[in-house]
Image (tube, helix red, strand yellow):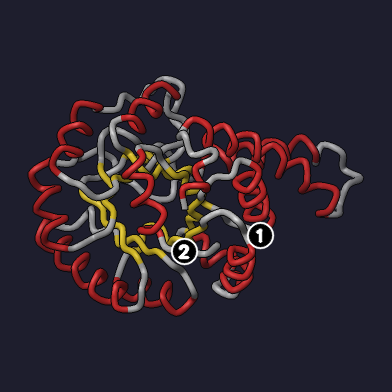
Amino acid sequence: MLTTGKAILDVANEYFFAVPAFNISDYAMFNGIIEISEEKNAPVILGIHPDEVNHVGVEMIAAVTQRAHRSPVPIAIHWDHGANYEQILTAIQSGFTSVMIDGSMLPFEENIAISRKVVHTAHAVGLSVEGELGTIGQTDSEAEDGSNAIIYTNPEDALTFVESTGVDSLAIAIGTSHGIYPKAMRPELKLDLLKEIKNKVNIPLVLHGGSNNPDDEIAEAVRLGINKINISSDIKVAYHMKMREVLADESLREPLTIQPPCIEAMKVVAGQKIDLFETAGKASLY
């Protein structure tokens, strides 16, 4: 069933589990993510970044919406990392049910101002809004967003931001980066900081840069109150590594031959995330 990010995450916040937000960039990937979510009876958020929207075309959202309506599990279609107000209007017009406005690189007051404006507009038409405070790192040029330096979220600022904007969920910075970490780099999440923020803020908390992090730290972050975890690189690596393997046979040319093994490889990784986040079976709560 198609629903909003708020409807999904409020339940996750109440029952202390996290919902994966899988970034999709083609229709075959989308189908695979829906299949594994239904197999696991798990709510899911489909994240589509503006670059991915440009790649697939906004017209694909209508097909995504129709499929979501037919699903027995809760599904939100989420505009990921909206950079400005105009992009949010595009998301509303295209059929998204959830939007993120990312003002994390702006001065604090400007971030509040643009986030409040987006909340006013999105709430008026029934969409939920995710804001971001603090900055996520970026590991390479393929990563969708991020900065050279992580600016950790200040708990007091988080409380002020939530009260001033009315956002439905908040993406926080506790040490993750977008992309795949180099071998010499081991991320370490500031879980004590997460505890402080959770004690201050009672809305669902979001972790960006969820790929390639140690499972034990992610599992602990879920137990401490993270309710949405963005996964993009991990499923795309699985999908395209398998595609490279399949395409070693140069006689293949049909997508119907090439793509199914890639989707299955992606589903294995997505299923592991669903289990790790304790999302499996939680669709029964809705």
- For mark 1, what is the residue? 27
The quarter in which the N terminus is drawn is bottom right
Above or below residue 7? Residue 273 is above
Amino acid type, residue under disc 1 in the picture = Tyr
Closer to the camera in the image, 228 or 16: 16
Crowd class of label 2 (few under 14; some 14 to 19; many from 20; radius 10 Å): many
Q: Residue furthest right?
A: 251
Can you give x and y, in whole percent of width and height, for residue 278 in the image? Answer: 47, 34
Above or below residue 258? Residue 120 is below
Q: Which mark is residue 3?
A: 2
Tell me: 62 left or right of 141: right
Tell me: 162 left or right of 182: left
At x 65% / y 40%, what residue is drawn? 267
Crowd class of label 1 (few under 14; some 14 to 19; many from 20; radius 10 Å): some
Above or below residue 134? Residue 103 is below
Can you give x and y, in whole percent of width and height, for residue 72 in the image? Answer: 60, 56
- Mark 1 or mark 2: which is in front? 2
